[in-house]
Image (tube, rainbow, N blue to C red):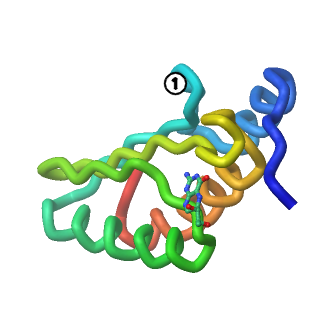
Amino acid sequence: MAAEPLSQKEIEDRLRELPGWSLDGDRIARTYRLGTHFAATGLVVHVAGIQEELDHHSDLTLGYNTVALTVNTHSAGGAVTALDFELARRVEDIAPGHGAS
Ligand SMILES: C[C@H](O)[C@H](O)[C@H]1CNC2=NC(N)=NC(=O)C2=N1
């Protein structure tokens, strides 16, 4: 079943469970800071694996010591859906292990 767009209230409620994540236009977003470029690269590779597993993909940007994600759901017309929050939750769970904050 296709993911349905979440309402503004649903988005706000779910964002409260994900400190560091925010609504950026029609996408949810977070930027992580890491100790080194190599550590940031490791986080990108780990996130890429999660995204393949979920078949749901953020725009994932590697900086010098930062990793930025923004995501919405193309198949829901570019709205924010539960799939975006599932990806965000999964990334939150593994990011601390990479030293990300
Ligand atoms: C065919 C495949 O399931 C789709 O293209 C997936 C892949 N990754 C995706 N990622 C995101 N962010 N939104 C989608 O709608 C989406 N669709």
Residue at position x 21%, y 58% from top?
35
Badge 1 marks a residue whose secondary structure is strand
What amino acid is found at the position of numbered circle 1 in the picture? Asp
Quadrant of ligand 1: it is bottom right
Q: 64 left or right of 74? A: left
Q: 36 left or right of 4? A: left
Image location of residue 89, percent across then percent down: 65, 58
Q: 79 left or right of 72? A: right
Q: Across the whole image, how many numbered discs are drawn on residues?
A: 1
Closer to the camera in the image, 79 or 32: 79
Q: Does the residue labelled 1 lie within 8 Å of ligand 1?
A: no
Residue at position x 27%, y 55% from top?
34
Image location of residue 44, percent across then percent down: 32, 66
Residue at position x 83%, y 43% from top?
4
Q: 96 left or right of 88? A: left
Residue at position x 84%, y 26% from top?
7
Q: How crowded is mark 1: few (under 14 residues within 10 Å), some or many (20 or more)?
A: few
Closer to the camera in the image, 14 or 75: 75
Image location of residue 27, percent across then percent down: 56, 33
Establish if 68 lies above or below 53. Answer: above
Which quadrant would the N terminus be assigned to in this image? Answer: bottom right
- Residue corresponding to mark 1: 24
Establish if 44 lies above or below 3. Answer: below
Establish if 6 lies above or below 81. Answer: above
